[in-house]
Amino acid sequence: MHFISEELEDYAANHSENEPELLAALNRETHQKVLQPRMLSGHFQGRVLSMISKLINPTHVLEIGTYTGYATLCLAEGMREGGTLDTLDNNEELYDMQKKYFDRSQWKDSIHQHLGNALEIIPGLGKKFDLVFIDADKENYINYFEMIVPMMNKGGVILSDNVLWSGKVLEPVKPNDKSTKILLEYNKLLKHDPRVETVLLPIRDGLTVSRVV
């Protein structure tokens, strides 16, 4: 679902920073070889993620939901020297593709891939995070948030993707649509939770920026 016209989306992308060559190659390969390539963050949202990361200049970054690693590389662009980025996914079929592009980047020694259940892996990371990107199974968004907030540095930022869910947040919820139900609860939680201040940006499928106070 396009919330603004495709022409305006193209104009916004064309008047933002260019897509780096490595990410353009990853973008192409994802569309050629991987199912559901629309899950990729893409040029415009990728530049938004990069800009946010550069403004924060994080030491430790956490990403829940790697997919093919496009957003991972965007978030890495703002990391401090010596920083780390832990990225989690449960799809082992994409692991080698992710690693290929991570290894081709300047952050190959800073990005740590984790394969498995995020709710089991996160507690063992033993870090305080400055930047977190939540972009995995929607039904666990609330669980991820509740687990992550105590692990955040004050002033840290939690980014949540797909919070508009193709406009389904405005439609009557079907009885079997658990993802939309959870996202509605999640959006309300971010609005009212005193631990964070939040702004929901209508970028692509909705991107929430929540700052830990």
Image (cartoon, helix red, strand yellow):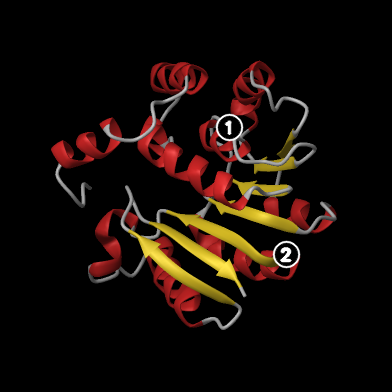
- Determine which quarter of the picture holds residue 65: top right
Q: Is residue 34 visible?
A: yes
Amino acid on which disc 2 is placed: Asn
Q: Between disc 1 and disc 2, whose residue precedes?
A: 1
Q: Residue at x 40, y 41 (%)?
A: 45
Q: Residue at x 69, y 51 (%)?
A: 118
In the rendered view, does 129 fall on the left or right side of 29?
right
Q: Residue at x 44, y 75 (%)?
A: 185
Number of numbered discs visible in the structure rendering? 2
SS at badge 1: helix
Q: Position of residue 14 (x, y in %)?
A: 27, 30
User: How many angstroms separate mark 1 from mark 2 (CA)?
Assistant: 22 Å
In the rendered view, does 143 fall on the left or right side of 185?
right
Amino acid on which disc 1 is placed: Leu
In the rendered view, does 122 fall on the left or right side of 4?
right
* Picture layout, residue 149 above or below residue 202: below
Q: Which residue is the site of mark 1?
A: 73
Disc ID at residue 43 = none
Image quadrant holding the C terminus, namely bottom right
Q: Which residue is the site of mark 2?
A: 153
